[in-house]
Image (cartoon, rainbow, N blue to C red):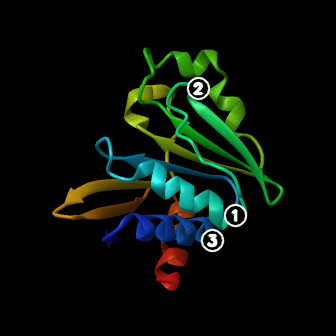
Amino acid sequence: MTHLITESAAMEDFGGHLAHACHTHSVLHLCGELGVGKTTLVRGFLKALGHKTTVKSPTYTLVEPYQLNKRMIYHFDFYRLGDPEELEYMGIRDYLEGNIICLIEWPEKGGQFTPLPDIKIQLFHHAESRLLEIKAYSIMGQSIIANLSMEN
């Protein structure tokens, strides 16, 4: 599935649609160059689930947790990860238990320690817009894309 985004507000809106398409226990990989809109997408995702305050990129902390609607949402940013094994030391597997959604920016930097995705969203600069390519990697991912298609 591909989707064209023409402005930042539309990227947040897309994040909101994505949030409503996700159900329990989902892992989403967000890939693309710096400044392509990964964190903006996450901001829209979290706002759609009721988050009211600032959403910051967890570039230095690696993860920002949010408890929304009786589930945990973990926003990871692996950009500054020095060694993929750091994820094992921080207990990455513990973040995958229960009713969770993990949004992972720069998942490729985590190597074999990065949780496998249900969906991967590749974001590209496309003239003055952004192009999103969305691919499912599990039955849950197929469900998310089907729900997302119905909303758009």
Side of 144 relative to 93 (left or right): left
Comes first in the chain, label 1 or label 2 = 1
Image coordinates of residue 24 in percent, x first then y, are 70, 59
| Dot 1 amino acid type | Leu
Comes first in the chain, label 3 or label 2 = 3
Q: Which of marks 3 and 2 is in front?
A: 2
| Dot 3 amino acid type | His
- Residue hosting label 3: 20
Quarter placement of the N terminus? bottom left
| Dot 2 amino acid type | Thr
Q: Do the residues labelled 3 and 2 touch (CB within 8 Å)?
A: no
Report crowding for label 1: few under 14, some 14 to 19, many 20 or more residues within 10 A (C-alpha).
some
Q: Distance between the residues labelled 3 and 1?
A: 8 Å
> Element at badge 3?
helix
Image coordinates of residue 102 in percent, x first then y, are 60, 46
Q: Which residue is drawn at 22% across and 56% down?
A: 125
Side of 99 relative to 152 (left or right): right
Q: Residue at x 73, y 63 (%)?
A: 50
Between 121 and 25, the residue placed more toward the observer is 121
- Residue hosting label 1: 49
Q: Distance between the residues labelled 1 and 2?
A: 22 Å
Side of 131 relative to 44 (left or right): left
Comes first in the chain, label 3 or label 1 = 3
Indicate the quadrant where residue 95 lies. top right
- Residue hosting label 2: 61
Image coordinates of residue 138 in percent, x first then y, are 51, 57
Residue 142 seen in the figure: no
Report crowding for label 2: few under 14, some 14 to 19, many 20 or more residues within 10 A (C-alpha).
few
